[in-house]
Image (cartoon, helix red, strand yellow):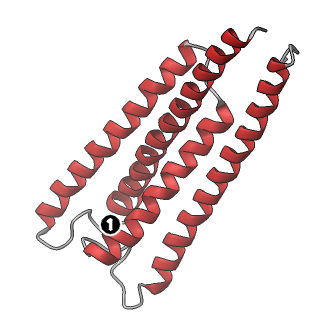
Amino acid sequence: MSSQPLKSHLNHTLLWRKRNLWSGVLFGIGLIAFIDEAVFHQLLHWHHFYDRSTTEVGLVSDGLFHALSWFATIGGLFIFADLRRRQAWLPKRWLGGVLLGAGGFQLYDGIIHHKLMGVHQVRYVEDVFIYDVVWNATALAIIVAGLVLITRSKRDEAQQEGMLANGESSY
């Protein structure tokens, strides 16, 4: 392979890597927000998105939160569909992005919303500390799993590029 097509191929590969990651991150944010909304807000009734006012305000805030998570999910899936159409979907990188987005959002929720802004708690009990620890530790575990997948995908992709640069087939 001459250097110009290889350079063009590598530029496209870099673009697809970024899109795979962002598609996964958006989908992960939407997915974890949906799980939070469905399980903790609606099924368990542990909290609303905004609990510093009336129940009615809490329900409206849940609706806005749910709409925002849906936009993230749809945005991620539009990019995903484009990647599939172009045959540029990188499953390991995309799944790593999903986990990174889900864990990042959960950690953001646990630290910023729960503790710094105080818009709601995981649960309104006397000793919320254990709930906070489980919430944030789970978020960190999800982030680490996502980073491991992304790192492994980088290694796999670098091996494939090396094979292409040497004129070998990647299959």
Tell me the amino acid under the disc marked 1: His
**In what element is the residue under mark 1?**
loop
Residue at the bottom extreme, as displayed: 126
What residue is drawn where x is 45% and y is 51%?
32
The quarter in which the C terminus is drawn is top right
Indicate the position of residue 112 as horizontal and vertical percent values: 34, 69
Residue at 33 percent of width and 39 percent of height: 70
Residue 22, above or below 63? above
> Is residue 125 in view from this perspective?
yes
Q: Position of residue 138 (x, y in %)?
A: 56, 66
* Count of numbered badges drawn on the protein: 1
Image-quadrant location for residue 46: bottom left
Looking at the image, is 110 positioned above or below residue 79?
below
Q: Neighbour class for label 1 at 10 Å: few (<14), some, many (≥20)?
A: few
Question: Which residue is nearer to you in this view: 37 or 151?
Answer: 151
Q: Can residue 46 be seen in this view?
A: no
Residue for point 54% across, 38% down: 21
Q: Mark 1 points at which residue?
A: 45
The answer to whether 97 appears left or right of 54 in the picture is right
At x 45%, y 45%, the residue is: 31
- Asked whether 49 or 111 is in front, the reply is 111
Give residue 48's position: percent from left, percent from top. Answer: 26, 64
- Residue nearest the observer in this picture, 82 or 155: 155
Where residue 93 appears, as percent x and y from the top left, is 64, 37
Quadrant housing the N terminus: top right
Q: Is residue 25 above or below residue 75?
A: below
